Amino acid sequence: MARETNSSFKAEIAALLANKDSAALKARLAAWLPADLAPILSELPVEQLAVLFRGCSKELGAAVFAYLEHGAKPKLLKVLTQAQVAALLNELPSDDRTAFLNELPLEVAMQMLGLLTPEERKIAQDLLAYPEHSVGRMMTLDYVAVRPAWTVRESLDYIRTHGYDRETLNMVYVTDEGGHMLDDIRVRRFLLADPDTKVSTLMDGNYATLAPTDDREKALLVFRKYDRVALPVTGPDHKLIGIVTADDMLDVAAAEATEDIQKLGGSEALDEPYTTIALTKMVKKRASWLVVLFLGEMLTATAMSYFEDELAKAIVLSLFIPLVISSGGNAGSQAATLVIRALALGEFRLRDWWRIMRRELAAGLMLGLILGSIGFLRIIIWSRFSHIYDPSPLRVATTVGTALVGIVLWGSLMGSMLPLILKKLGFDPATSSAPFVATLVDVTGLIIYFTVALFIML
Amino acid sequence: MARETNSSFKAEIAALLANKDSAALKARLAAWLPADLAPILSELPVEQLAVLFRGCSKELGAAVFAYLEHGAKPKLLKVLTQAQVAALLNELPSDDRTAFLNELPLEVAMQMLGLLTPEERKIAQDLLAYPEHSVGRMMTLDYVAVRPAWTVRESLDYIRTHGYDRETLNMVYVTDEGGHMLDDIRVRRFLLADPDTKVSTLMDGNYATLAPTDDREKALLVFRKYDRVALPVTGPDHKLIGIVTADDMLDVAAAEATEDIQKLGGSEALDEPYTTIALTKMVKKRASWLVVLFLGEMLTATAMSYFEDELAKAIVLSLFIPLVISSGGNAGSQAATLVIRALALGEFRLRDWWRIMRRELAAGLMLGLILGSIGFLRIIIWSRFSHIYDPSPLRVATTVGTALVGIVLWGSLMGSMLPLILKKLGFDPATSSAPFVATLVDVTGLIIYFTVALFIML
């Protein structure tokens, strides 16, 4: 669809609202997808937005509401009457409603629950009872379940009379009388089959499921494995209790990647968009890690104070401190990041740690030799043009080169093993961020550097 | 489904293969989902795998083939007869086939194309003609398109006779005689409507599309925006040419996150799983960035050599070099990572750079004051117990504290602006990894540190 510019559309909507021309308004709104409509409507004054929600169909209202900006939702609810709020909340798809209620302060969420019909309230409470970031929280109940003994004709009639709202009619699920999961069958097979065929003859008893308590990260791996656009969720007794759709998993994938990336960058996960999070809140999240890293890095001063006499004897050593320790830190960041991502993608298990260690021993040694050689050559070549490395440039070069091999190897090992150790201890491996590894490697790198120097130079 | 242990299942399959009991074999295989079956079958000797592929149905063969491990696919094709390979390739879903052909050396891919029927070859060539990582490469042609003038009954009959293989019968697309996209309609609406209704009365002309040349990263944002399990792809003339499903987008999301995370960790994207990539290949990808960073970090030695006299006068300054410069690097890593992720999620545009800069100025100042105060206090307190800061601990503390404020502020600014500058210049913003920013900040940080020291201490 050709999209008009947002501002002219907004002006038009405002004019239609002012004229109370609800027929024209409905027609204009229908030409837009809820996802496109919501950001524009979010910018309207909340009173206009309320008028609009009263005017439009329940379905459109619910669809648009789910896409409104976080700030606009509670504001809108405040200016709607209680009956209007109740109608809207009852109409919302169950997974969108769970997500919305979860964002609210507890007391407001409770008030909202009170507005739901007993049936919808039960659904909402059940979904909210699952832990945050679990499959249960993302479930929708808009699925179709039929019985094995029904015919295809009966099944299609059932689908017609129990038409569900969302775009999830891909799979029809087969359950027994008690609601226990028996199979999933593509809708296509119902359309292609003879109407008198029994559902049971279409079954192959072969399907993948999620548990409501599964972490969303685990669900993501299952979705990726089976390449499904929706997966059924079954409870501990194998009862079918909902489905999760792949479009929601895309949001999970983005959220999980954001969390990992922010941790890898050395801050707490912000949990809110960078552009809208309050400044003080963001500074708090960033400061906590910066302070921890700072306290850790203080050990470098402590470590160096032990070598103060050596430093005084050979000031030239201090010139290479940043170069040497940062190389270890960089090698460590690389290794940590690669291992953390491979863990997140389920590429290997903790018990394979020795395979990783062997790889990193080899890789770290090669990388160390490369950097060590460059460092060695750089000092030797430079010493032809400058006297800062006198009296013995060869010794300086050998010290720096040898220390680099050791430190890069050490950094690669530390970087790769740290995420595994964190995971083993029950922490998020992404905590061993690039800055975290770099800090650890800085302290030990200094010790390696000065120890090598002691042997070679002093 | 209860899952047997893989090894007993493998043994059973091997036994059935040895006995040539193809009926029992088919029954056993049918109880497994292709995604579960493939990793187990991948471990079979390739001759057994070939026997199995000859024995099983075309559909199952094609479904399992797509999930086989990369190494197993070409091996299997080598032991199948040409006719069998042709049958398999013609049966593969078009998007899986595109992905498979793309992995092959060009000459092998050409041979494979030659085995396809003229019709399938045309399809495969068209898809491969789109750039790598574009929507075109991920398209599947398994969609259903009807005409506005048809009735619902005619449409359902058409769907029945043109039954498609994959689980994408969610949306029915409406096109005109020339194949131009007119609308998308949920299959559900066809099932719920009176059979004599015209398709045109179900249309609202309101839909979202992708272009075949869209980058997969852009497609991901569109999918997330509209919460669809499938989106139609239209050509420049608005012709419907395929669809993309959300399950494939999950793989895109994972691949894009991996690429960004690996770059953020300071190495090139590996493009292969960490656990299986050849060691030398991985070392090459990691070494290139480590060397660049190393060369950059060499400037620290150059910068410091300018301050060698000052260092000699106050060795105590050198003790805090790692602490001071790494704090700037950490602050920069945080800022860079947050900005890069926000860019990838489409949270803001380049022209909003001044908003980011203002935020980072404020955040950097606060963070700098926090770390600066801690550093100042640490030195003052320590000086009660030690004489390493004599003769003037207050001056040392003031130097370190002041330098920290400046460096953390500078790091935050550099870290946040660098990704924007890279993007503006047409590079991937993720290139400004934590180690890259840290290296830049190290060099400038040293200059800030020594300049402050010159004013306060010397």
Image: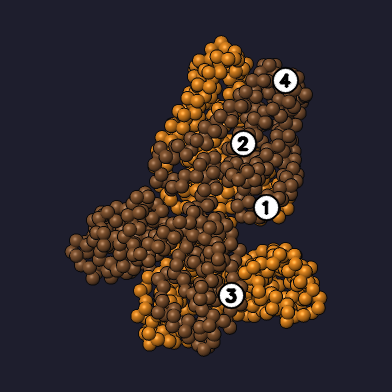
Chain colours: A orange, B brown
Q: Are marks 1 and 4 in contact (CB under 8 Å)?
A: no
Residue with the mark numbered 2 = B438
Q: Are marks 3 and 2 in contact (CB under 8 Å)?
A: no
Residue with the mark numbered 1 = B349
Residue with the mark numbered 3 = A123
The mark nearer the N terminus, 2 or 4, is: 4
Q: Is residue A391 left or right of residue B398?
A: left
Q: Chain of mark 3?
A: A
Confirm whether residue A278 shows in the render.
yes
Residue drawn at (56%, 74%) of the image: B183
| Numbered disc 3: secondary structure | helix
Q: Are marks 1 and 3 on the same chain?
A: no
Q: Nearer the viewer, residue A101 or A228?
A: A228
Q: Are marks 1 and 3 in contact (CB under 8 Å)?
A: no
The residue furthest left is B19
Residue drawn at (24%, 69%) of the image: B24
Q: Are marks 1 and 4 on the same chain?
A: yes
Name above or below for residue A200 compared with residue A352: below
Q: Label 1 crowding class (10 Å Cα cut-off): few <14, some 14-19, many 20+?
A: few
Q: Are marks 3 and 2 on the same chain?
A: no
Q: Label 2 crowding class (10 Å Cα cut-off): few <14, some 14-19, many 20+?
A: many
Frontmost of labels 4 and 3 is: 3
For the residue marked with disc 1, what is the amino acid? Answer: Arg
Q: Chain of mark 4?
A: B
For the residue marked with disc 2, what is the amino acid? Answer: Ala
Name above or below for residue B207 compared with residue B280: below
Q: Return the x and y of residue B232 as percentages of the image width and height.
A: 53, 67
| Numbered disc 1: secondary structure | loop
| Numbered disc 4: secondary structure | loop
The residue furthest top is A391
Residue with the mark numbered 4 = B390
**Quadrant holding the C terminus of chain B:** top right
